[in-house]
Image (cartoon, rainbow, N blue to C red):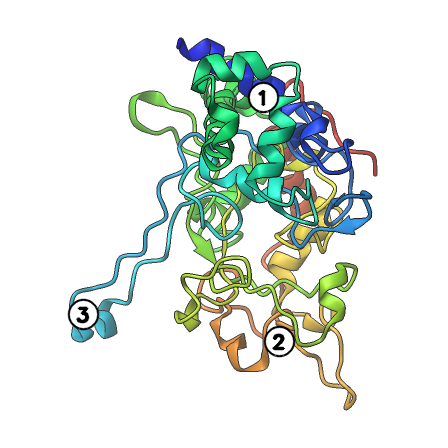
Amino acid sequence: MAAPDLVAIGKTAFFDPSLSASGKQSCASCHSPANAYGPPNGLAVQLGGPNMDRAGLRSVPSLRYLRAVPYWTYTQANSLKERLEDGDNQPIGGYTWDGRYNAPAQQAAFPLLNPDEMANTGADDVAKKLSKSAYAQQFREAFGQDVFSRPAEALADLGKALQAFQFNDPSFAPYSSKFDRVLDGKDHLTPQEAHGLTLFSDPDKGNCASCHLVDKGAHGTHPALTDYNFQTLGVPRNRDIPANRDPNFFDMGLCGPLREDQTKQKWFCGMFRTPTLRNVATRGAFFHNGVFHNLEDSMRFYVQRDTNPKKWYPKDAHGHVVKFDDLPKDLRSNVDIKTEPMTNHLGGKPVWSDSDIRDVVAFLNTLTDADAKTVPR
């Protein structure tokens, strides 16, 4: 079957709410094309489930610019001596905040079966819904006339179609932002935007470009504004997420609870994959738990986390600030305190002023694609 036909099936399925238990939620409900395939609102987490009243666990990421995501990899030095002298490489790659899938085709089953999202009870449920869809015959022609009698395969085939849509439809990688025009010599940054880029890139200031790459790649390819590595930033706990109301529950990214194969790697706890910053200025929820709802506060946290922690974290019963409160106490030492600007000390001067933050935000606005709408504030 020709690839464009598989893309068409994937596109139709992406927008099909009948694949959900509620009959009201499709992939596009959380990954809105009008909002750069990110969430259409400023909620920290989206609602789903059979009655559309169950809250998810993590902020919904954009699906744009994900074709180049590498497989999840963690490379250790061969000997203990090398590990002690040089340290280990950071984990890299994989889809979702914790990198547990190596392709969108694998990831697709999670929202389809997640009780907080599309809430199907299993592959049988998905296959039954597909068999009644308007594109059921197209699906049979692509994957076999008896495909719906093989539910597990039908679910996997649906993932393949959704991946084909995400990888081949140009709307997932338009490269239509002002920054792209600047890279191609067709536009120029304003003085404010240029100063924001300087601050963003300065290794002694924001140092953002060390993870959110801004330079062209091989053969002039435009950057995705991420290196796909994992970081432990120690963002504040978001108590608006229902799961976080349990004081014994912690979303620790690479080491669980959704990812189960890295639980023994305790230094992974709290690590989440660096997202692309393309279209970041259109969002209404930031970081993996959506704890911040405007870009300015996200930037302030980044440069003031250690200079003014009482602004960001709660106090305990004794009046002490509880830094890194979204990790268990014995794992808070995992949080990055060695990379600029996460090296500043209590009471020190943040590397960015409010004026600097406005300039960085002006630069980040140049990363917005021409068709991307900002979510309602």
Residue 210, image x and y in percent?
A: 42, 48
In the image, 44 versus 217, the foreground residue is 44
Residue 263, placed above or below residue 67:
below
Quarter containing the N terminus = top left
* Near-viewer residue (267 or 260): 260
Among numbered discs 1 and 2, the one appearing first in the sequence: 1
Q: Which secondary structure lies at badge 1?
A: helix
Residue 287 is situated, as x and y percent measured from the top left of the image, at 63, 51
As shown in the figure, which amino acid type bears the numbered disc 1? Lys
Q: Is residue 83 left or right of residue 36?
A: left
Q: Which quadrant would residue 353 be assigned to in this image?
A: bottom right
Q: CA distance from mark 3 to mark 2?
A: 33 Å
**Callout 2: 10 Å neighbours few (<14), some, many (20+)?**
some
Q: Disc 3 marks which amino acid?
A: Glu
The residue where tag 1 is placed is 178
Residue at x 69% of width, y 30% of height: 26
Give the residue at mark 3: 82
Number of disc labels: 3
Which residue is at 62% across, 69% downward? 250
Q: Which residue is mark 2?
A: 346
- Front: mark 3 or 1: 3
How far separated are the C-alphas under marks 1 and 2?
38 Å
The crowding category of the residue bearing disc 3, from other C-alpha atoms within 10 Å (few below 14, some 14 to 19, many at least 20), is: few
Q: Amino acid at mark 2?
A: Leu
Q: Is residue 355 left or right of residue 278?
A: right
User: From where the camera sits, is residue 356 visible?
Assistant: yes
Looking at the figure, which quarter contains the C terminus?
Answer: top right
**Image spot of residue 6 (x, y percent):** 47, 15
* Residue 328, position as x, y percentages in the image: 59, 77
Say whether marks 1 and 2 touch (CB < 8 Å).
no
Q: Nearer the viewer, residue 26 or 371?
A: 26
| Alpha carbon distance from label 3 to label 1 | 44 Å
